[in-house]
Amino acid sequence: MSLVTEVAAAPQALALAHFESLLQFETDCWDVHHTLSSGHADFVLLDVRGADQFAAGHIPGATHLQHGKIIGSRLAHYAEDTLFVTYCAGPHCNGAARAAIRLARLGRPVKIMPGGITGWIAEGFALKTAPADAGMHA
């Protein structure tokens, strides 16, 4: 018996429920890239890192809004059912989760993109640069 098989895999129904539920909370870099590239994005991609990080390189099509600045008035121009997808530096950063908490508390649909910039670059996708003051303005 190995460390892998020491604990049995979950029964099929439990495994299905678990893995389906994961996709209610997160998406990945490839799916975001594919959707943005199609020109039919049905979500708002939020870069929740600092302004200097955003300026140095962000995902094309992303809106900049630091997680600590997510408040209702900054989202007022979006329909209530707008899905927000948050990302930060990568799996070592909890900014995307912090932003997701703020959005959920505001009653907004939200998912995170756990790979963040690190995952985006690992997939071979390009970044865009911008002036440090670019981003969402309320």
Image: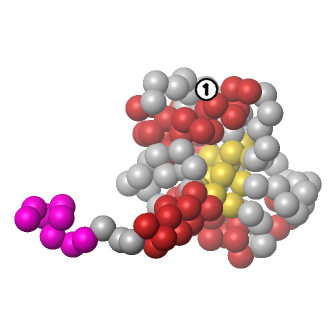
Taking the image as drawn, is residue 67 in sight? no
Residue named by callout 1: 128
Q: Is residue 127 above or below residue 8?
A: above
Let me know if residue 3 is in the magenta part. yes
The quadrant in which the N terminus is found is: bottom left
Percent position of residue 22, x then y: 53, 62
Instruction: Assign the magenta stretch its main secondary structure.
Output: loop
In this view, which residue lies farthest toward the left?
1
Pinpoint residue 100: horizontal percent, then vertical percent.
63, 64
Q: Residue at x 38, y 54 (%)?
A: 92
Q: Quadrant of residue 37?
A: top right
Q: Which residue is pictured at 15% across the width and 70% down the height?
A: 6
Start-end of magenta stretch: 1-8
Residue 43 in sight: yes
Q: Position of residue 106 (x, y in %)?
A: 77, 72
The residue under label 1 is which amino acid type? Answer: Lys
The residue under the point 88% across, 54% down is 78
Q: Is residue 17 left or right of residue 91?
A: right
Residue furthest front as drawn = 12
**Callout 1: helix, strand or loop?**
loop
Q: Quick one: quadrant of the C terminus? A: bottom right
Q: For this rendering, which residue is in front, 33 or 98?
A: 33
Q: Nearer the viewer, residue 28 or 63?
A: 28
Q: Residues within 10 Å of mark 1 (few under 14, many from 20)?
A: few
Residue 104 part of the magenta-drawn span: no
Total numbered badges shown on the rendered structure: 1
Name above or below for residue 45 compared with residue 94. above
